[in-house]
């Protein structure tokens, strides 16, 4: 079985990706390889941040790996929060509740609530670099709805569902999300190599 390191310490992401991958790949986390470094995400694009994390793991541990970066891109906000999605409310820390409240506050007088979630995965395998992208179009709900998921899930409503990710539930989200779409491309690539 192929082993890959997923360059994250985010337990929610790890759980989500493991559920999507199923039994195809043995997925290791940063903790599994004893990497406790907080790898800085200093690029101004999702692609750049994903590559920074994957390159760090590959160069320091010599293991095939992938990393992702995800951004919520809101039309009325000129594409923000984008690369700052995880630290939208506070630049020095992750606070999902504060991020969501900040987003809803910024959109309260906006009629255009269209947005998209975009995930970019950078894979480094045997020293070669590959990028995979997943996008889901949708809108930002006027208030939080639903109890499942994490981050912006209670306010992001994927197109043609009429519900937020948090209302749809984890299983449905894992089938239609931006991350699921990027991971599907990654898995198709890895399976093609066999």
Image (tube, rainbow, N blue to C red):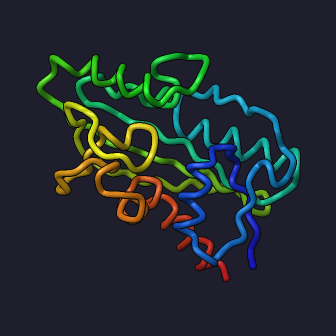
Pinpoint residue 138: horizontal percent, then vertical percent.
24, 45
Q: Depth check: 45 or 103 in front? A: 103
Residue farthest bottom in this picture: 194
Residue farthest left in this picture: 111
Q: Depth check: 115 or 128 in front? A: 115
Q: Name the residue located 47 percent from the left edge and 54 percent from the top edge.
A: 179
Pinpoint residue 118: horizontal percent, then vertical percent.
41, 45
Q: Is residue 112 above or below residue 102?
A: below
Quadrant location of the C terminus in the rendered image: bottom right
Q: Depth check: 181 or 124 in front? A: 181
Pinpoint residue 25: horizontal percent, then vertical percent.
68, 73
Q: Is residue 150 left or right of residue 33?
A: left
Q: How many marks?
A: 0
Q: Is residue 33 left or right of residue 112?
A: right
Residue farthest front in this picture: 147
Q: Is residue 37 left or right of residue 167?
A: right
Q: Name the residue located 54 percent from the left edge and 66 percent from the top edge.
A: 19
Q: Depth check: 32 or 54 in front? A: 32
Q: Is residue 144 above or below residue 177?
A: above
Q: Name the residue located 82 percent from the left edge and 38 percent from the top edge.
A: 36
Quadrant location of the N terminus in the rendered image: bottom right
Q: Name the residue located 39 percent from the left edge and 50 percent from the top edge.
A: 148
Q: Is residue 71 left or right of residue 139?
A: right
Pinpoint residue 147: horizontal percent, then vertical percent.
36, 46
């Amino acid at each position: 079985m192929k082993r890959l390191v997923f360059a994250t310490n985010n337990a929610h992401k790890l759980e989500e990706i493991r559920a999507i991958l199923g039994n195809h790949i043995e997925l290791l986390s940063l903790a599994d390889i004893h990497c406790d470094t907080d790898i800085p995400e200093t690029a101004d694009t999702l692609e750049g941040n994903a590559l920074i994390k994957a390159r760090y793991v590959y160069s320091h541990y010599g293991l095939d790996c992938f990393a992702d970066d995800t951004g919520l891109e809101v039309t009325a906000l000129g594409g923000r929060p984008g690369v700052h999605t995880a630290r939208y409310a506070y630049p020095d820390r992750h606070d999902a509740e504060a991020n969501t409240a900040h987003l809803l506050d910024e959109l309260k007088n906006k009629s255009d609530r269209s947005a998209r979630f975009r995930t970019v995965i950078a894979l480094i395998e045997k020293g070669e670099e590959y990028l995979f992208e997943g996008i889901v179009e949708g809108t930002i709900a006027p208030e939080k709805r639903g109890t499942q998921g994490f981050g912006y899930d209670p306010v992001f409503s994927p197109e043609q569902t009429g519900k937020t990710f948090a209302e749809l539930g984890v299983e449905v989200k894992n089938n239609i999300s931006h991350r699921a779409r990027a991971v599907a491309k990654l898995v198709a690539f890895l399976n093609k190599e066999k």
